[in-house]
Image (cartoon, rainbow, N blue to C red):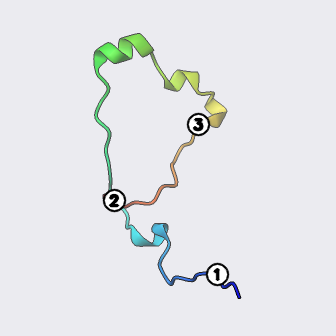
Amino acid sequence: MFRQAKWSEPLIFELGYEGRRGYIPPRVDDEVKSVVGDVLARIPENLRRKELNLPQLSE
């Protein structure tokens, strides 16, 4: 008989706390910016998010 596995683990959103940060990507070089341009201008305003609902966890 098949039985679904069960774990009593908290959700990833329950593990973090306010202000905790994980990976912070490095700043983009000016040379790259001049070639690529403003990437945010390519995303339509109605598709941009004001806040990201990401879990606040460290690595």
Task: Classify residue 55 by image quadrant.
Answer: bottom left
Q: Amino acid at mark 3?
A: Arg
- Label 3 – label 1 distance at C-alpha: 39 Å
Residue at the disc numbered 3: 48
Packing grade of label 2 (10 A; few <14, some 14-19, many >=20) is: few
Residue at the disc numbered 1: 4
> Considering only vertical position in the picture, is 28 above or below 59?
above
x and y percentages locating residue 17 in the rendered image: 37, 67
**Tag 3–tag 1 contact (CB < 8 Å):** no
Element under disc 2: loop
Residue at the disc numbered 2: 19
Q: Is residue 59 left or right of residue 6?
A: left
**Residue drawn at 31 percent across, 59 percent down:** 58
**Residue drawn at 57 percent across, 22 percent down:** 42
Q: For marks 3 and 1, give the one nearer the viewer.
A: 1
Quadrant of the image for the C terminus? bottom left
Q: Amino acid at mark 1?
A: Gln
Q: Is residue 45 left or right of residue 55?
A: right
Packing grade of label 1 (10 A; few <14, some 14-19, many >=20) is: few
> Considering only vertical position in the picture, is 13 above or below 2?
above
x and y percentages locating residue 50 in the rendered image: 54, 43
Seen as rendered, the residue at the extreme right is: 1
